[in-house]
Image (tube, grey):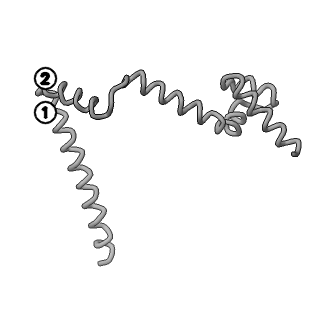
């Protein structure tokens, strides 16, 4: 193991043990800025990032399955016909816009050949 690998391992360990305190690691490692530390060691935070996303999703959605969430949404829309109408209009407008873009892209290559 070379010195730089030991240094990298040390910084990674410090980042994990400090709870992701990049400024602490920056100071210990002598990096000019926290950005250098982040760019080098941010990958060590992926598991923590995923765990946080799962925790937030759990708190936001609770223990409901996707089908239960869809049922809840449909119930809300059934109770508010105006909201249901606006949502349908927005979805149809988005679909039409995507269709227009697809048609435009399909036409352009033919126009260039002429």
Is tag 1's residue or tag 2's residue first in the polypeptide sequence? 2
Residue at x 42% of width, y 25% of height: 58
Residue nearest the observer in this picture, 71 or 104: 71
Q: Which residue of the protein is positioned furthest toward the left in this rendering?
A: 81
Location of the C terminus by quadrant is bottom left
Q: Is residue 102 above or below residue 49?
A: below
Location of the N terminus by quadrant is top right
Disc 1 on helix, strand or loop? helix
Q: Is residue 20 above or below residue 93?
A: above
The reply, left or right, for residue 21 in relation to residue 59 is right
Depth check, mark 1 against mark 2: the one in front is: 2
Q: Residues within 10 Å of mark 2 (few under 14, many from 20)?
A: few
Residue at x 80% of width, y 33% of height: 10
Residue 9 x, y percent position in the rendering = 78, 37
Residue 66 x, y percent position in the rendering = 31, 34
Instruction: Identify the mark at residue 85; answer none if there is no mark.
Output: 1
The reply, left or right, for residue 34 in relation to residue 103 is right
Q: Which residue of the protein is positioned furthest toward the bottom in this rendering?
A: 114
Residue at x 63% of width, y 33% of height: 45
Disc 2 on helix, strand or loop? helix
Residue 57, image quadrant? top left
Q: CA distance from mark 1 to mark 2?
A: 12 Å
Q: Which residue is mark 2?
A: 79
Residue nearest the observer in this picture, 82 or 74: 74
Q: Residues within 10 Å of mark 1 (few under 14, many from 20)?
A: few
Q: Is residue 19 above or below residue 5?
A: above
Residue at x 68% of width, y 23% of height: 21
Residue 22 x, y percent position in the rendering = 69, 27
């Amino acid at each position: 193991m070379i010195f730089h690998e030991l240094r990298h391992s040390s910084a990674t360990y410090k980042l994990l043990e400090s709870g992701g305190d990049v400024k602490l690691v920056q100071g210990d490692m002598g990096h000019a800025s926290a950005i250098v530390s982040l760019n080098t060691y941010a990958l060590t935070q992926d598991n923590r990032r995923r765990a946080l996303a799962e925790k937030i999703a759990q708190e936001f959605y609770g223990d409901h399955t996707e089908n239960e969430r869809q049922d809840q949404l449909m119930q809300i829309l059934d109770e508010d016909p105006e909201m249901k109408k606006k949502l349908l209009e927005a979805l149809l407008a988005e679909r039409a816009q995507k269709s227009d873009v697809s048609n435009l892209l399909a036409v352009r290559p033919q126009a260039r050949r002429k």
